[in-house]
Amino acid sequence: MIIELQRGGHIQRMVYDDFEARIRNGEIPPDLPIRFEAVTGDDFVPVGQLELYQVLADPKRREFRRKLTTSGVPLITALLVGVQIRIYLASWTPGAEDFLQSAFTNWAPGVLEQAQVYRLLTYGLLHISFTHLLFNLTFLAYTGYNLERALGRLNLLVLYFGSVFTGGVLSMWMAPERPSLGASGGDFGLIAAAVVFGWKHWDDIPKQARAKFGWALAPYLGFSLISGLSAENVDNWGHLGGLLGGAFLMTLLTPEIAPEHAQRNRRVRRMAVAAGLSLSFLFGIWGPSLISMTSRGEGSWTVPVPSYWREGWTFTGDRGWFSPTGEATMVVTRTVQDRPLSDAAAVDKLIDRIAAAGHEPQVLERTPLEVAGHEGVLLVIQFSLAGELQELRSVVLTRGVVTYRAHLQSSAHRASHYGPVLQRALTAARLDVPEELTLAYERAATHPRSWQPAVELADALYRTGEPVKALAEYERALSFSPVQTQALVGRLRVYAFYGLDGGLAVARESISTASEDVRVLVAATDVFDSVGATEESIDVLDQAWIALPGNGIIRRARLRRGLPVDI
């Protein structure tokens, strides 16, 4: 079936299906004369008079297509471009650039630790150089103008700031140690939205406007992503986040060519705003609970710390990690003493260390706490540092001669805010079997009939807080070599420093077994001192000093007890 269209002085013929498609696409105006023999006979009549045209033609669809091909005032696009230019010019004022970058860039410590959630939007309005500004605003002006005509002003606003927000969130999450700024996250979102728009509405877009949407923009998107990956100072996570945000929002938004479309877009805008506000509230209230953590180890003691905190040395002389905000410090440390300490004694040493630095600690809490499957002590103290009241929450636990500690220090008024960081760290803390003990077990299993591996295993058990097992290994070593000095001294050391029952009898027996071994004699006196037999300890040292005047081992033992060493 052939339709004839009268255009100027010539007649255009087309098949009916093509004629119908052109009416639907708004390509045939209502005043165009046509001749359709089955309907108009031999006469040309304006196509708009036909019922067929009135059924197929959609004036709103024609209006949508007209907007895509005619110029207009891109008010929101112009406003976004103008605001960013004004901010850039304002940054030339002395001190303004530093202020803008420190206060409004996307910065994980500011968002998560200081509740400055506005940074997730404001960073998209800042630029560091004219080239940076020019590149970003070129893309913004081009894609923003086209999308504003296609979707409307409010939808463009949601697309741009939604893309900036998703880009900021992904950048903050994946690269928390790096601040970022610039409109590129929003630009990537708008380019991605223009690509998706073209894919969704390709048949509705006039041919002269198709170069601005869909596959026509995909190469620019791919090139920008690839070039960003090759540059060190480019926020690629922000680009990717903006791209994903813009593409996702565009799958939900639609041109408002019908009332139901406008209603749907209102729901999408409200959903986007609600999601952004909800995430912002989450970051503002529970930010410290969301900080990414990285495990840090001190030997067998492993505790997570915030991944982007910077390593340094604290006022207590410990290796620590400092928040970039300057508001908090975390320490994970392992200390080896010359003899076993109880948890209470280790806590007292920490308090004394702070007091010795003149900080006047005040103990607020000192309670038992299980960490990594081991009993420890939770210590909460306040003290003054550089004129500011500080609070330190520390977990201390001991295993033999080793003290393990993890603490978080912050200003007193921010202590509750940072509390979740320490809680998360302690929940994931691990205290593994020391490598020294594992190797000692392997050697003892390989040489079960040798006294030396048994002594090495016993020494490792003594150092790692297993006194009963250590005694058993010392006894096994003595079964192979009854007067082996290392085993005798080690056994006495266990009784002296762990306070096990029966030490007095063992000390006396050891003296009779190895009366001429100075190391055994001195070790026995440590046992006597630990059970309060001070006179017996002095008597042994006196006799040893008479027998071996000037002996260095005996001399040091006498000096420790304040005994004379004159010869």
Image: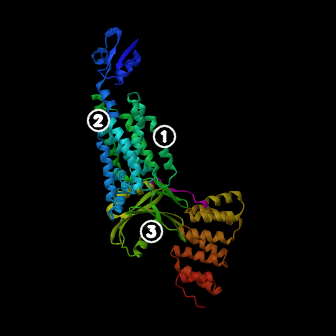
Name the residue type under label 2.
Arg
Instruction: Indicate the secondary structure of the residue bearing disc 2.
Output: helix
Residue 65 on the magenta span? no
Give the residues drawn in magenta, as a range: 426-435
Q: Quadrant of the C terminus?
A: bottom right
The first of marks 3 and 2 along the sequence is 2
Disc 1 marks which residue? Answer: 219
Q: Nearer the viewer, residue 458 or 144?
A: 144
- Marks counted in the figure total 3
Instruction: Indicate the secondary structure of the residue bearing disc 3.
Output: loop
The first of marks 1 and 2 along the sequence is 1
Instruction: Indicate the secondary structure of the residue bearing disc 1.
Output: helix
Which of the numbered marks, if any, corresponds to residue 266? 2
Q: Position of residue 514 (x, y in %)?
A: 67, 75
Q: Residue at x 40, y 47 (%)?
A: 185
Q: Position of residue 291 (x, y in %)?
A: 42, 53
Q: Position of residue 379 (x, y in %)?
A: 40, 64
The first of marks 3 and 1 along the sequence is 1
- The quarter holding residue 77 reads top left
Residue 428 on the magenta span? yes
Disc 3 marks which residue? Answer: 314
Dot 2: few (<14), some (14–19), or many (≥20) neighbours within 10 Å? some
Where is 232 relative to 521, above or below?
above
Name the residue type under label 3.
Thr
Asked whether the beta carbons under mark 3 and mark 2 sit within 8 Å of each other, the answer is no
Position of 343 with respect to 267 (left or right) is: right
